[in-house]
Image (tube, rainbow, N blue to C red):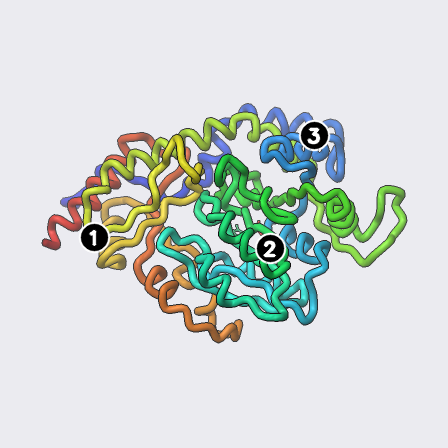
């Protein structure tokens, strides 16, 4: 073999998420297991309290996953049949599926050059039936919420934030998830705050909404066990809650490390005119980004992806390479040329807690090498 791999940089290292602190994780699991505390126990309550306080929201509710979080939030907010909900097509299908399963019509719109929902596209998509805007706090960034809130106020719309990728990010000092009537999160293992299975949460400042969501989460049962509405079973496992509470303690360090990797990519790749980089991390400014993903746009994207692969570097096309409106069988029938172009050029570089600075430099140098060979 002539060219043995110098280095291997996987896109995400799942075993590392467990082994990086195996002793700490096992201690939590043993503690919960020996207490037999599996469903709706104090570890969940403590996590909810700490998660609310981390985001600055009044209430947090643990649920089974990030998709359920969206469905429960929309249902509790009264979104349903006859309503339209506007969302960015550059999102996970779960955003649109939640609107669908709440009984409403998903209305996809364009993203902007920072890949976040384009407020001017939102304004154009409002009709008499529009009930809510559901922005995705994508890639660890919070949208320009001032623009979205202005549109929402003007037309009397609710905002429900899909902040599954937004934890730790802020807009004008305010955390993702705290702008609308509710904000939702996912603790899928590859999310910045990941558990060891599925998990999700909803935050809100609205106490009435919180009580309804709490009831919906547990079979429609109120605090006395009385069934007061049709509900779901969407509880966050107590063992996952305990693990999340444990990991939340060091989450600010995780965000700091992710920002450092993004800054390193930014400084090494900024000079390449064939790339469009995400906004770099800034200390003072409107956006504080947590870099759930480092999503670039690249010329000769497919060739670059292949070149990196042969050099041991894992990259990923988000949503397997399609925006929601591009899934024909969902019949959304939207024409979104700007999003189509972004999707044809986008690529996520590895950005994870298993990476060293040398790994980051290696990725950047291979990208530079690819384009120097092309010219
Ligand atoms: C991960 C994700 C979800 C769904 O989360 P699950 O916990 O897998 O249900 C929803 N929206 C976005 C933008 C996501 O990235």
> Alpha-carbon distance for marks 1 and 3?
48 Å
Residue 244 spot, x, y in % from top left: 60, 34
- Picture quadrant of residue 157: bottom right
In this rendered view, identify the residue nearer to me: 356 or 83: 83
> Alpha-carbon distance for marks 2 and 1?
40 Å
Q: Residues within 10 Å of mark 3 (few under 14, many from 20)?
A: some
Q: Nearer the viewer, mark 3 or mark 2?
A: 2
167 horizontally vs 200: left or right: left
Q: Which label is found at residue 153?
A: 2
Would you name the residue on which mark 3 appears?
46
Closer to the N terminus: mark 1 or mark 3?
A: 3
264 horizontally vs 160: left or right: left
In this rendered view, identify the residue nearer to me: 354 or 100: 100
Secondary structure category for the residue under label 2: helix
Q: Nearer the viewer, mark 2 or mark 1?
A: 2
Closer to the N terminus: mark 2 or mark 1?
A: 2
Secondary structure category for the residue under label 1: loop
Q: Nearer the viewer, mark 1 or mark 3?
A: 1
Secondary structure category for the residue under label 3: helix
**Mark 3 Cβ and ligand 1 under 8 Å apart:** no
Residue 364 in sight: yes
């Amino acid at each position: 073999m002539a060219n043995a791999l110098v280095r291997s940089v996987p896109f995400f290292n799942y075993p590392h998420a467990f082994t990086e602190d195996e002793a700490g994780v096992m201690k939590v699991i043993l503690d919960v297991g020996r207490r037999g505390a599996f469903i709706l126990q104090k570890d969940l309550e403590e996590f909810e309290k700490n998660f609310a306080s981390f985001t600055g929201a009044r209430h947090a509710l643990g649920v089974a996953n990030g998709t359920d979080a969206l469905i429960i939030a929309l249902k509790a907010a009264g979104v349903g049949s006859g309503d339209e909900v506007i969302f960015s097509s550059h999102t996970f299908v779960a955003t649109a599926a939640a609107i669908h399963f709440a009984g409403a019509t998903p209305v996809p719109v364009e993203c902007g050059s920072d890949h976040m929902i384009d407020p001017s596209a939102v304004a154009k998509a409002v009709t008499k039936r529009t009930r809510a805007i559901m922005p995705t706090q994508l890639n660890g960034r919070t949208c320009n919420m001032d623009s979205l809130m202005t549109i929402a106020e003007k037309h009397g719309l609710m905002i429900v934030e899909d902040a599954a990728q937004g934890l730790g990010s802020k807009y004008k000092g305010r955390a993702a998830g705290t702008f609308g009537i509710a904000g939702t999160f996912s603790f899928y293992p590859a999310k910045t705050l990941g558990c060891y299975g599925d998990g999700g949460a909803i935050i809100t400042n609205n106490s009435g909404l919180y009580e309804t969501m709490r009831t919906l989460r547990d079979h429609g049962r109120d605090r006395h066990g009385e069934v007061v509405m049709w509900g779901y079973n969407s509880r966050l496992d107590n063992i996952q809650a305990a693990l999340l509470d444990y990991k939340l303690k060091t989450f600010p360090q995780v965000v700091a490390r992710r920002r450092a990797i993004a800054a390193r990519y930014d400084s090494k790749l900024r000079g390449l005119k064939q790339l469009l980089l995400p906004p770099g991390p800034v200390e003072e400014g409107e956006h504080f980004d947590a870099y759930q993903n480092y999503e670039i746009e690249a010329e000769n994207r497919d060739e670059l992806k292949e070149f990196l692969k042969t050099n041991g570097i894992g990259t990923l096309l988000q949503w397997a390479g399609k925006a929601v409106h591009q899934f024909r069988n969902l019949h959304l029938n939207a024409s979104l040329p700007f999003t189509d172009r972004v999707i044809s050029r986008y690529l996520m570089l590895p950005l994870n807690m298993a990476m060293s600075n040398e790994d980051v430099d290696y990725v950047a140098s291979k990208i530079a090498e690819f384009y120097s060979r092309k010219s």
